[in-house]
Amino acid sequence: MCVAALRSFAEWDKHPQSHALRGNPPIQLVKIADSPPRALSGSLRPLEGIKVLELTRVLAGPAAGRTLADLGADVLWVTSPQLPSLPVADIDTSRGKRATQLDLTQPEDADKLRDLASGADVFLQSYRPNSLCHRGFSPEELARLRPGIVVANLRGYGWEGPWQEKRAFDSLVQAATGLNLAEGQARAESRNDDPSPKNIEALPVQCLDHGAGQLLAFGIMAALYRSMKEGGSWEVRVSLAGVGEWLRQLGQLDPMEAFEGKALPPRSSPVDEELRPLMQEWSIRGMSSFRGPMTLKALSSPISLEGISVGSSEVPGTLNSDSPTWI
């Protein structure tokens, strides 16, 4: 059973893990090995020619990979056939990627992953701390295998302190660090209710996950820039709890203002008129029905760069749509 003790901000601030996170930026870049500077691609798309090997699951890591794909990277998303799929989240976060499956308990599949890593520019992973290290894919091993690589890691609670290897996901971190209680009490205050400990509420849209995903993508691009300017292999570190600390530092709106905003448009078919101009259609690769090729409609990429093509046009039909090779 996945659980976390519910804490207030005051209680979390006294915790040793909170002390370990204090003062750290939400993104950390660590040089892990020396190598010659990376050559520039000369492409109009920011990440065209960059190969991203993605081993992630559920929102934060996959969202980072999707952003990199929007900017032109060749993202190969590797998942395990031994883990259950999450169809709605998977198809949303696989936009613009290729998808394949490898079972790392099988030596031949582990060798395939090692071969892929030797040709990758970026290795993005979000599994529990050190799980891939124990299979020979630590940042140091990857830097030896592919000099100049950028290794991006997501953790629940960071790289220092008593919880540095603790498993976590967005909802647990919100509960443990005071965010659920603060959100619930703010909601109660906006309704003139008693802000008791029973008033708990999740932050909207799994914002630790999505925030961590965008910060991971930003950190990867910063590390690629550093590798072009000064060389070296780099590790990018982002944690869900670190993102939560950063969000707290941004401050809180007055509850009476925060909860009086316009409601989100409803999820409906046909799409709400307010959302229609923001939508895009993707073809689902390898899938069709009696009506013809299947498509996905979703909000288009929020990225906008003048004179630069961003976004994607295809979605893999399954998590094993593609072969485990670079193109």
Image (cartoon, rainbow, N blue to C red):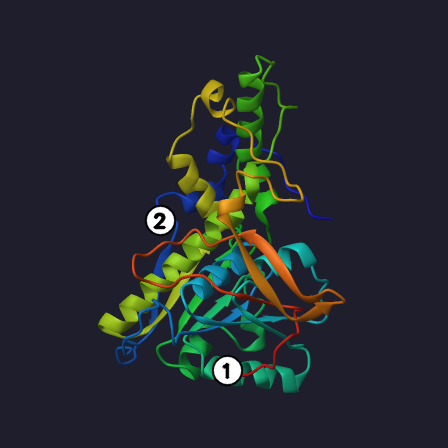
Q: In the displayed structure, would residue 185 be above or below residue 131?
A: above
Q: Is residue 125 left or right of residue 220?
A: right
Residue 129 has which mark? none
Numbered disc 1: secondary structure: loop
Q: Residue at x 60, y 61 (%)?
A: 57
Q: Amino acid at mark 2?
A: Pro
Q: Position of residue 296 (x, y in %)?
A: 62, 58
Nearer the observer: mark 2 or 1; the answer is 1
Q: Are marks 2 and 1 in contact (CB under 8 Å)?
A: no
Q: Position of residue 38 (x, y in %)?
A: 29, 77
In the rendered image, the residue lying farthest to the right is 290
Residue 24 percent location from the top left of the image: 36, 48
Mark 2 nearby-residue class (10 Å; few <14, some 14–19, many ≥20): some
Nearest the camera: 104 or 98? Answer: 98
Residue at label 1? 326
Query: Circle 2 is placed at which residue position?
Result: 25
